[in-house]
Amino acid sequence: MFQKTRLRLLLAYLGIFASILSIFAIAVRTVFVHTMTNQVVDKLTTLGQTVAASSGFKNGRIQVADNLSVRDLDVQRQALQWIDIKGNTIYIQGNRTLSLPAAIRESIQIQPSKPSLISVNIPIVDTYNRSLVGYLRVSQSLEDLNETFRKLDIGLAGGAAIALILVGMGGIFLTRQAMRPIENSFDRLQQFTADASHELRSPLMAIKASSQVALRYPEGMRPTDAEEFKAIARSAERMSRLTEDLLILARMDKKLKATWESINLTELLQHLVTQFQAQALEKNLTLIYQSSGSLMLKGNSEQILRLFTNLIENAIHYTPSGGKITVSASLIGQSIDVKVEDTGIGIAPDQLEHIFDRFWRADTSRSQWTGGSGLGLAIAKSIVEAHGGKITVTCELVGSCFTVKLPT
């Protein structure tokens, strides 16, 4: 019963931890990328300033420094590009130059496409008249830096995956520990419910029997006393039904092993429809059964009988006079679909999700029947799930339809 709760709790743990871990990994990567990029920019700036300081301006032209060999530039995967004041390239050293247009007003340029490069623009100033004569663009390949970032991403992803696995293992243990007190309390509540229901059966039977005996001999009894005994008998009947329902639910919750047998579902449904014909005629209802042949399934006959008894009773009590109830069964693939459809007062769409809750009833129009315990549909759902099936309900403008899907 608590498997889904434990799973949801575990997924919540993992989701929260994964979110925190993702934020942490993104922050670490962002800081690392920013730091490494700034280091490259500082190195290029230092190189550019050194080269630009040795460059000059003579006879209207920039004098290119020759104190740095092309070989050294290639080893460092760098390049130098001299640009005049108009943005025209004058001279190039090295092979790692940007294919992007010279943006002399931008101090840093990045070329993301292959080859991936970063460049820094350093102004060249005429030392005589202190005027700007051009720019030196210092470029460097980002291949090594991108490879470092890729390894960082792999490390962060691998670490996050390992962390999630470890957290998942720890989460399984923690969810079990967290749910254990709840499960123990629920087990004790189940045991108490079963014991109380069992113990209440005897005194309730005694009350019912005593009231029935008193009603058989009305001589010497005041009319008001007779009404009181009838009320006692009705209340005892309701209490007996409630205790039986609670006992069934307690047994279903404990998933006690029941004897499974081959059940002729067609005969069982026909028997139920015949049994409820008198009750349906009393309310002027049409109760019919439709089947596509002999249908067999494996299950507990007592539980299956209780399942469809509850559904048919529910349909009879919530269908007004003159209505119609149809019970149909058909074989679809490897499962049997049984539908109990009525033309009753229906169920509001916003209340469908609660229809199988224990002790829950819909609006006041569906609460007029005081003979039930509010557990009939909850019992039906428990029985269906115990047989590996599924029960659903749909509503039209008039009436509702309960569909039970059971494996054959």
Image (cartoon, grey):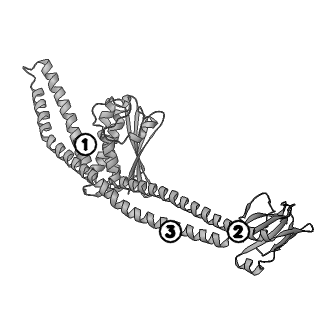
Image: 212 above or below 187: above
Quarter-wise, where is residue 125 in the image? Answer: bottom right
The residue that disc 2 covers is 46
The residue carrying pointer 1 sits among few (fewer than 14), some (14 to 19) or many (20 or more) residues within 10 Å by Cα, namely many
Q: Nearer the viewer, mark 2 or mark 3?
A: 2
- Mark 2 Cα shell of 10 Å, populated few (<14), some (14-19), many (≥20): some
- Mark 3, residue position: 158
Decide which of tag 3 and tag 1 comes sooner along the chain: 3
The extreme left residue here reads: 220
- Mark 1 to mark 2 CA distance (whole Å): 86 Å
- Quadrant where the C terminus sits is bottom left
Residues at marks 3 and 1, CA–CA distance in whole angstroms: 53 Å
Q: Is residue 112 left or right of residue 371?
A: right
Under circle 3, the secondary element is helix
Q: Which one is nearer the viewer's eye here, 42 or 159?
A: 42
Q: Please determine whether, in this image, residue 233 is positioned above or below residue 76.
A: above
Mark 1: which amino acid?
Asp
